[in-house]
């Protein structure tokens, strides 16, 4: 079991890890090659670089710094976080890993599909969390939009609740998944229709299917997806924390773009530092 698992290897996540590792806490950083800092062509407003630096170089330097300090790094997709035996269980593509504390330092990567009518039905049949809302679709027929590992994870959470699931890849390659009550349609989606709630999905070839609900699982799980499954308070797609980067669940911290606000590297580094120090204090106070 790890003392702390950090999700995300951008400035916030690496900064948190530098402090927890130096405090002799067993630290693991789980990440994918996604970080908003990588999109910056040149950074001129960050301390210490007289000629500026590209976002990609700063990102790679951070990872090398963590590795040089001895922090364990795991490049896998995080699907969800749950509780297990008085610890947190991080579910990744290939592993389930326990930790005493968790720091969420990944930005919101989820992108809403550009499908006509979809946004009109959010909260009216369109959901972003199978664990949160699957109960409301007991014995009904639903669709899951997505084609990757995260989409399959959502399907698995719905399998024993709903009557039938249709995976809609929206034109992407169909996933290799088989179950008696699961169908796959790979055609591009044209629009979502209904009166007060979602009722029908129409495809580019003008064919359509009826559905009682739609679960969005395109791409990989972002901060909102992970948070809602765990029960964290989220406002405007950002995790709510106090001044110590503590969430409403003891032992869970958030920092950087995950908390919204000023999306700057300096803010991410500061919050990562605060989250790391808060996690250290929590672990020291809860030795067992």
Image (cartoon, helix red, strand yellow):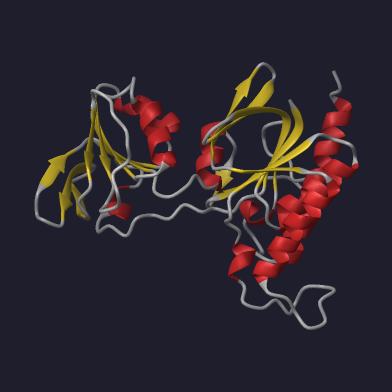
Q: Residue at 75% x, 35% y: name it.
A: 4
Comparing 93 with 269, the one in front is 93
Would you say 89 lies left or right of 213 here? right
Asked where in the image residue 60 lies, by quadrant, the reply is bottom right
Image-based side of 155 in relation to 54, left or right: left
Q: Residue 269: x percent and y percent?
A: 77, 58
Answer above or below: position of 116 versus 144. Answer: below
Residue 96, by quadrant, is top right
Q: Quadrant of the N terminus?
A: top right
Q: How many numbered marks have been drawn onto this rendered protein structure?
A: 0
**Residue 59 in picture, x, y percent from top left:** 69, 62
Q: Position of residue 102 (x, y in %)?
A: 70, 36
Q: Nearer the viewer, residue 171 or 274?
A: 171
**Closest to the observer, 22 or 272:** 22
* Residue at screen point 26% across, 34% down: 142
Question: In the rendered view, would you say 271 is above or below 277?
Answer: below
Tell me where residue 15 appears, x and y as whole percent: 79, 53
Residue at 23% x, 38% y is 184
Q: Quadrant of the C terminus?
A: top right
Residue that appears at 83% across and 73% down: 47
Report the side of 258 relative to 185 (left or right): right
């Amino acid at each position: 079991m790890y003392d702390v698992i950090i999700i995300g290897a951008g400035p916030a996540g690496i900064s948190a890890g530098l402090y927890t590792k130096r405090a002799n806490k067993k630290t693991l950083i789980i990440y994918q090659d996604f970080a908003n800092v990588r999109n910056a062509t040149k950074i001129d407003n960050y301390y210490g670089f007289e000629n500026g630096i590209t976002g990609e170089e700063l990102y790679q330097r951070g990872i090398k710094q963590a590795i040089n300090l001895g922090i364990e790094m795991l490049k896998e997709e995080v699907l969800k976080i749950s509780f297990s035996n008085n610890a947190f269980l991080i579910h990744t593509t290939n592993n389930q890993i326990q930790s005493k504390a968790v720091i969420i330092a990944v930005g919101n990567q989820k992108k809403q599909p550009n499908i006509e009518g979809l946004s009109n039905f959010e909260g009216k049949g369109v959901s972003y969390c199978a664990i949160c809302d699957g109960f409301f679709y007991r014995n009904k027929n639903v669709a899951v939009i997505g084609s990757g590992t995260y989409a399959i994870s959502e399907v698995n959470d719905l399998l024993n609740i709903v009557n039938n699931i249709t995976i809609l890849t929206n034109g992407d390659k169909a996933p290799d998944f088989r179950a008696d009550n699961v169908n796959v349609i790979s055609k591009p989606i044209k629009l979502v229709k209904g009166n007060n709630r979602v009722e029908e999905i129409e495809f580019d070839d003008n064919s359509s299917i009826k559905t009682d609900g739609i679960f969005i699982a395109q791409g990989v799980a972002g901060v909102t997806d992970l948070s809602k499954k765990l029960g964290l308070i989220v406002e405007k797609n950002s995790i709510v924390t106090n001044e110590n980067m503590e969430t409403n669940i003891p032992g869970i911290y958030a920092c950087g773009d995950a908390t919204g606000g000023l999306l700057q590297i300096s803010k991410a580094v500061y919050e990562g530092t605060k989250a790391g120090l808060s996690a250290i204090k929590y672990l020291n106070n809860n030795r067992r």
